[in-house]
Amino acid sequence: MAETRRRLRSSTVVLGGMGVLAATLSACGSDPDRRCVDRDSYDYINGYKIVADTNCSPSVSTGTGGRQTGKARTANGDWYYDADVSGGWAEDGTFSRSEAVDRGGFGCSGGSGGG
């Protein structure tokens, strides 16, 4: 009876450890938070104005060799990652997706925060 209890506890510890490891690895592989911002709207106090995602979406192929955008762009949009968002503005982020991923979280490479 004691052996069964001990075996059950040790397998619970192993399964729990595997769950923590899986969560750590998936956190590093996940996409960073991103916002579509107008690069031409920078304000020293507020940062960049957030605009509709259609301003940042990649163009779609027409199938005839040409390129065509889904909707007309109204801003010089670009994806801005890991920004602090407030009142329709984003600041303290980065335009580099790889840099945003490298900023890391629990178990990821790179430092915490940064700018």
Image (cartoon, grey):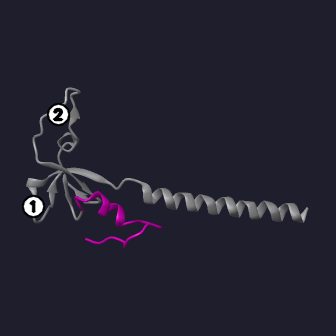
The percent coordinates of residue 9 (x first, y second) are 76, 63
Which residue appears farthest toward the front when viewing the image?
65
Picture residue at 22% right of the left edge, 65% below the top: 92
Element marked by disc 2: strand
10 Å crowding of disc 2: few (<14), some (14-19), many (20+): few
Left or right of residue 104, residue 96 in this image? left
10 Å crowding of disc 1: few (<14), some (14-19), many (20+): few
The quarter of the rendered structure image containing the N terminus is: bottom right
The percent coordinates of residue 97 (x first, y second) are 29, 57
Q: Look at label 1 and name its amino acid.
A: Asp
Picture residue at 48% right of the left edge, 56% below the top: 26
Q: On the image, which quarter does residue 28 sit in?
A: bottom left
Picture residue at 10% right of the left edge, 65% below the top: 44
Residues in magenta? 94-115
Picture residue at 31% right of the left edge, 60% below the top: 98
- Confirm whether the magenta stretch covers residue 81: no
Q: Which numbered disc, 1 or 2, marks the residue closer to the eye?
A: 2
Q: Which residue is mark 2?
A: 67
Which residue appears farthest toward the top when viewing the image?
64
